[in-house]
Amino acid sequence: MTQPRPDLEPTPGLSREEMEGMQRDIADAAVFEDDFEFDPAVLSSPLESAASGADPPTVVGVDQSFLTNDAGEQDRALSAVVAMRGGEVVERAHAITSLEIPYVPGLLAFREGRPILAALEELSVEPDLLLFDGSGRIHFREAGIATHVGVVRDVPSIGVAKSLLCGTSTEDTENLPEGSRVPIEADSRVEVSDGTLLGYAVQTRQYDSPNRHINPLYVSPGHRVGPETAADVVLALAAGYKLPEPVRLADAYATEAKPARED
DNA sequence: GCGACAG
DNA sequence: ATCTTGTCGC
């Protein structure tokens, strides 16, 4: 049985070696297969579930925006979380923390993890599933931000990235039909056997036109969710837009919650 | 040395 | 991520 790992919280002030070492511990503690109570099928048809009596899970979308100081430099991160149940927003919260390190591919959790954990603390509802804007297992050390936060809080989580950090797709992902998925496997850049299934390129939306197309999302397990279920959930939560609804709304709230500038 | 690199 | 005009297509 897994449990929260506050000892693995992304702490500021660590050396690169220490951060990478902590990520290997995160990967060891992570569960890349289904391990949750709720019924994922309920996500696609909230109305039917209400009729059948099954209570829909609380899914929380997480996204960040950044604030600049008077000198015009990014000095704070704002994390916004939007909780949904049965297709409805039930609560929103946000938190702002200072930025300690610059953006470095592979170390995103150490830059944005603190405001995310703080925003989740502000939430009064208990999340059954967390959806992040970034990778989960699709990461050099299999410890993307979705995996990191999921393990620290021991909450099932999924990573939803708009571009691929590492790994290779099994086949071409250009102009995939809506609703389809293509496996993303580990390559030499990932610290795991080549060919390991890390996640899926998922096409939540696509144009009909022959001369224009939409790129897929790169979905991977964060914690306690397998790759197939992760893709199923993202497709079920996409409501006419590329991003699954909880993340799309968190994205909008991250901008909306920015304090007005003082002039 | 060169290339690759979530947000 | 963020800064930003126009432009293509439904």
Image (tube, coloured by chain):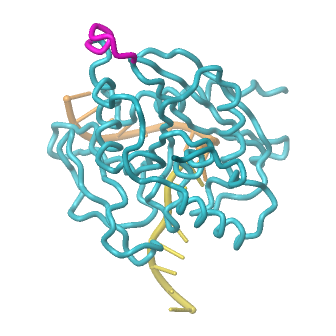
Chain colours: A cyan, B yellow, C orange
The reply, left or right, for residue A101 in relation to residue A38 is right
Which one is nearer the viewer's eye here, A99 or A57?
Answer: A57
Residue at the spot 41% in from the left edge and 59% down from the top edge:
A164
Which region of the structure is painted magenta? Answer: A48-55
- Determine the image quadrant of residue A166: bottom left
Residue at the spot 68% in from the left edge and 28% down from the top edge:
A94
The reply, left or right, for residue C4 in relation to residue A15 is left
Residue at the spot 21% in from the left edge and 63% down from the top edge:
A171
In the figure, C4 relative to A196: above or below?
above
Q: How many marks?
A: 0
Q: Main secondary structure of the magenta part?
A: helix
Magenta stretch encompasses residue A146: no
Which one is nearer the viewer's eye here, A127 or A69?
Answer: A127
Residue A204 is situated, as x and y percent measured from the top left of the image, at: 28, 38
Residue A43 is situated, as x and y percent measured from the top left of the image, at: 33, 25
Quadrant for the C terminus of chain A in the image = top right
Residue A78 is situated, as x and y percent measured from the top left of the image, at: 69, 36
The reply, left or right, for residue A26 in relation to residue A218 is right
